[in-house]
Amino acid sequence: MNSDIITQKGERLSFYQLFAEFRYRIVIPIIQREYAQGRTGNRATEVRSQFLNALYDYLEEDIPFRDLDFIYGNLSTDETGICFIPLDGQQRLTTLFLLHRYLYLISNDVHSKQEYLKNVVLEGKSLFTYKTRQSASDFCDALMTNDIDLSELRQDENGKQSLSLTIKNQHWFFRSWVLDPTVCSMLVMLEAIHVKFQGKHDYFARLIDLNNPIITFLFMNLKKYRLTDELYIKMNSRGKQLTSFENFKAQYGKYLETLESEQDFKLSFNGKETSLPLQKYFSHRIDTCWTDMLWSCRDIDGETNYNLFDQKIANFIRTIFTFHYVTTNYDSTNLKALREKELPSFNRYRELGVLTKESTLFLIDAFDILYAHIGNSGKLELLSQKHPFHESKTFENSLRYKFENYAEQICFYAYLKYLIRYGCNGNFADWIRVVYNLSHPNNTITNTQEEFASAIRSIDKMLPIADHIIDYLSSDKNVEISYFSSWQVKEEKIKACLILRNENWRNAILKTEQHGYFTGQIGFILSFAGITEFYKCQANCNWNEDEDKLFFESFSMYAEKSSVVFANSYDKRINNKNYCFERAVLTKGDYLSEASANRWNLLSSSSSRNNIPRDYSWRRLLRLDDSSNQQKQLWVKAVFDDMRFDALYPTESLEKICKDGATEMWRNEFVRQSKLFDYSQQGFITFINDTSIMLLKESQMNHNHVELFTYALWINYIENEERLLSNELYYSSSRRCEDIPCVFFKIRSGKTDYNLQITSEVKDYRLVTFIIDFWKATGRNKRIEDYNLDVIEILKINKFNWDNETCEFRKKMKSHKDIVTLLHLLSIELS
């Protein structure tokens, strides 16, 4: 190097000399801000234009050694050689890097281009790189190692040729890179360079001339001149705070350097497969294809903000770490902390004991297997649309770290583990279907972290047989599946035997399972068809062909009828107008499900409160091997077996069954009057000491409630009776146990108000007598002498008796119609 380029302040060098003569790598450090000369905005555009104009003029004038001021930095050594780490001059160096690359692309000097590449690219990597983000580094590598055909530039929306759009359209360009402000600024600068320098083929040779370089700068090694990084940072505070996720990645990357893994990590660069250590593999993939995959899913919340997108990646990482953590000897307190709303930091993960080699390998495998199937499409579609497990929705929930329930997470864990272990083979759908059926909240209750952990561990135990789950379930071996409900496990075993018989059985079972009400639970249909009894005796379904035909026809018949009755789903049943199914079953027997505190449930509610769908639904009553409900299930079967029931006309045919009524009086009230079901919004009723039955508007007696028989009297005979239209006639519900619900009638006779109340007297819930009490509402009323003689006469004519104990007139009646007639007469005679 010519000695006259040494100055008292530093060394006059060109960008290319740092590589060709000194063999440096230029590494922009983390403390530097993003590349800013490519920003948008009037001020940035002006600065960019001025700088490019100056560079253009220098190259056009062809006068060597045109300085761009000082470039400060330090030299350090790593496994790749000597690195120059600039602390000032990052913006100018990056622009020079881009200018060199563009002029290289348009140059016709083949020899110079070969020499240049030999000095600025090493083993497929650019020797100019960024440490601020892996994506910026990867973009520099890709830009330097891939050709761009400038003769076929894409057009922008204004019809102008665009270099940046052309680059974005290259097969090697990851869409997630547009999240990186540095990459975006580089693209803007490349576009501006193209506009300014297109056609200047000779400039490249002038730029890389080692003897007489046109553009230079004064290079200063701070350590050589006994200056420090801290001095520079104090003088020029341009450091930029990293996001919380970037901090996590940086710290996690250092942690990964300490891990040794026997697993071989390979990537392909320029068609050549290269082995990488775990840390480098993770760092490359997290900032390229994995982020690109998740970027393609960004529309789930309509957010493109970089920090918010980073949070989605962090949420997925937390999902995987949570899964792995519960498979270990986890601490429940730490698990609770791991699931808190705030994203854990790297140090927090370490404190919780989450960070291990195994959790890292699971994370890498999960990312890789999802990328293998999603790529840049943004869609996860390995299962058919009819499959009950919604894979795409669940994956999106993992990016939010906001799942619907534990069951969804259990299925997602089983989903990922199967793909990692076996790939997407022909048995994948069966595995997920079985796990979905076992884990669904209606089939196995999972409410606590401990239960969730037990479920995940059970999935782990099942993984060795996951790829032949149907064969395993159908075998005569003692199938052991822990945690999940035994009755659902048994149902899955019977269905597995049927599925293996032939495709007709498989198709019929899958179709029935997919019904919106059943959530995979169809054991009652197997029982109604006689299949469960056969399996109980034989531990298989190995009947002959003639028997198979009969069993299949029976199964199909009950599947059709139940599918019609329970269409479409728990909260949207369409063939149950006026609760015709519940009323029809009541004609066969008392099917009510027992709750606590003398409460029972009508299974009529579509409410999702208080675990009603799980604990008090037809699904719950009809589940397999429930001895307490065996007789009640037979009453449901009796409805399906009734000759009047027609699956083509379910509502009409069920109403025909209801016309027969029921043998018990209380059941008959429900059969005759569907409005009784309407009042009980959650389906609860209470039987009190053989004396009364209360319909609860909510779930407890401390809410409004009415008495069954008086309320039935009210809605059947009084409420809409034209002869009794009066604002003073109403049904009085109660909110306290000591208060008695009743029909209440306020009558004015002359200037005196009188009250009439109808309550019921019930014996064994079968014999009902209505009690009509009449009393003076105001003034003295404790003696019969306090009443007007005309009023007393009218009451005696209507067979009221004075009750000395209650100090009221009282009459007992049984006939509903006679009660209506009485009320009508009193309203006339006393007015």
Image (spheres, grey):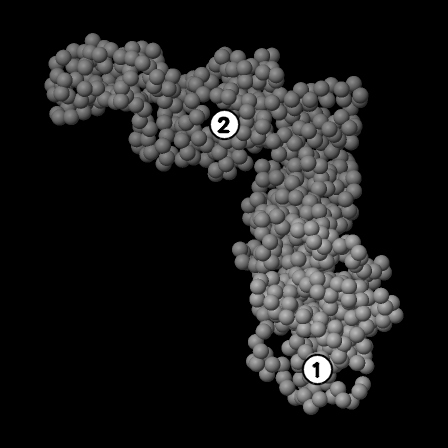
Q: Nearer the viewer, residue 31 or 260?
A: 31
- Residue picked out by circle 1: 219
Q: Amino acid at mark 1?
A: Phe
Mark 2 nearby-residue class (10 Å; few <14, some 14–19, many ≥20): many
Say which quarter of the image contains residue 477. Answer: top right
Q: Where is residue 108? Give x, y as percent.
A: 85, 66
| Residue 504 to residue 151: above or below | above
Tell me, yes or no, if residue 262 can be seen here.
no
Work out which quarter of the rendered image holds the C terminus and state it. top left
Secondary structure type for disc 1: strand
Q: Is residue 780 left or right of residue 34?
A: left
Q: What residue lies at 53% left-to-right and 12% top-to-bottom? A: 656
Secondary structure type for disc 2: loop
Count of numbered circles on the image: 2
- Which mark lies nearer to you, 2 or 1? 1
Work out which quarter of the rendered image holds the N terminus and state it. bottom right
Q: Where is residue 717? Give x, y as percent.
A: 35, 15
Say which quarter of the image contains residue 492. Answer: top right
| Residue 86 to residue 652: above or below | below
Q: What residue lies at 65% left-to-right and 25% top-to-bottom? A: 525
| Residue 58 to residue 530: above or below | below
Mark before the other along the chain sequence, 2 or 1: 1
- Residue picked out by circle 2: 604
Q: Where is residue 461? Give x, y as percent.
A: 71, 48
Q: What residue lies at 69% left-to-right and 77% top-to-bottom? A: 85
Tell me, yes or no, if residue 408 can be seen here.
yes
Q: Where is residue 128? Give x, y as percent.
A: 74, 71
Q: What residue lies at 76% left-to-right and 89% top-to-bottom? A: 4
Q: Amino acid at mark 2?
A: Ser
**Do residues under tags 2 and 1 come within 8 Å of each other at their CB atoms?**
no
Residue located farthest toward the bottom when viewing the structure as drawn:
8
Q: Nearer the viewer, residue 371 or 120?
A: 120
